[in-house]
Image (cartoon, rainbow, N blue to C red):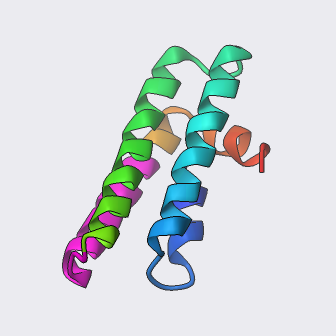
Amino acid sequence: MITSIMGLTEGGDPTSPQVSDEVIFISDTLSLLRDAEEISNDAFLEAGMIQGGLSILCSMIMNGSNDQEISAQIKSMISKAEALRSRFPELDAKIESHR
């Protein structure tokens, strides 16, 4: 999840279509991983918080939120993604292997 967020933000502010595409990718990939029993239901649910945060970010960008609000949302998601990585260290690599 951290790789997804960092990938969106490394070139500056992400666009709404970029974030939307990432939300779809994460949603599809998490479902595949859970259905294949490669991740636990707990990992699936906790990763859903990051997916939800990205959906909020997409809406914020579409609605013209200011840079400060967008930056705060991104920082919050990075913090949550780091906590998720601590709890489920294999999750990020499993998600990225589906790119």
The answer to whether residue 39 is magenta is no
In the image: residue 46, left or right of residue 6: left
In the image: residue 65, left or right of residue 37: left
Q: Is residue 86 visible?
A: yes
Residue appearing at x 57%, y 46% in the figure: 24
Residue appearing at x 72%, y 38% in the figure: 94
Residue appearing at x 41%, y 45% in the figure: 50
Query: Residue 59, position in %: x, y?
Result: 31, 60
Residue appearing at x 20%, y 73% in the figure: 69
Query: Looking at the picture, does residue 3 appear above or below residue 26?
Result: below
- Along the line of sight, the residue nearer the viewer: 14 or 96: 14
Determine the main secondary structure of the stretch shown in magenta. helix
Q: Find the magenta span and give its range.
A: 64-82
Query: Residue 61, position in %: x, y?
Result: 33, 71
Which quadrant of the figure has residue 65?
Answer: bottom left
Query: Residue 40, position in %: x, y?
Result: 57, 17
Which quadrant of the figure has residue 97?
Answer: top right
